[in-house]
Image (cartoon, grey):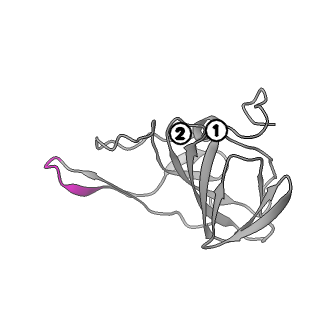
Amino acid sequence: MSALPPFRRVVTGIDAQGRSCIQIDGPPLPLGGGGAQLAWRTEAIPADNSGAEDCPAAQFSFDLMNGPGSLCMVMEFAPDMQRFFHATDTIDYVAMLSGAMVVEMEAGEVTIREGDVLVQRGVQHCWRNDSGQPARAMIVSLPSHPVGPAKDAMGMRT
């Protein structure tokens, strides 16, 4: 259960008369595991914006982030979360919505706070929450060409 209040998910579309409209106004979709909730995902880029159906809920995995589509999720980071160095073949736009997170790289680290935006370009990194309070970020992941070492048997770059 989230320590922070749920966010509201509003999704636009086209109604039966061809007019712009609000198609979804409610809670996020479950994105099981890792403290994430799904705002939206697409199966390809460019996205197919036709249709009125919701995107399917999913179980969180790094494969989900590795495309070929896009992923927009809201991730909650508990103060006692376990560090995990990883890299994905994505470019990630991370907007801190509340709290603060330390982003560790192999050569340095930076603290991002509410209102900050991080562009994470597929490199080895891990998240650390030193604040003693939950933190929340919106993360948009898009496929990218790999950088860095080859992937291991789990699909993670080593």
Q: Is residue 122 above or below residue 117?
A: above
Q: In the figure, is residue 20 to the left or right of 118? A: left
Residue located at (78% from left, 56% from top): 81
Residue located at (62% from left, 60% from top): 2
| Residue 42 horizontal/vertical position (percent) | 45, 41
Taking depth in this image into account, of 126 and 130 the one nearest to the observer is 126
Identify residue type, mark 2. Ala
Question: Can you tell which quarter of the image residue 115 is in?
Answer: bottom right
Q: Callout 1: helix, strand or loop?
A: loop
Q: Callout 2: helix, strand or loop?
A: strand
State how far apart marks 2 and 1 are (Cα).
9 Å
Q: In the figure, is residue 142 to the left or right of 132? A: left
Q: Do the residues bearing badges 2 and 1 touch, measured as CB atoms within 8 Å?
A: yes
Q: Which residue is mark 2?
A: 58
| Residue 35 horizontal/vertical position (percent) | 65, 53
Q: Is residue 152 above or below residue 28?
A: above
Q: Which residues are magenta?
A: 16-22
Q: Which residue is mark 1?
A: 61
Residue located at (23% from left, 56% from top): 20
Q: Is residue 137 within the magenta segment?
A: no
Say which quadrant the N terminus sits in: bottom right
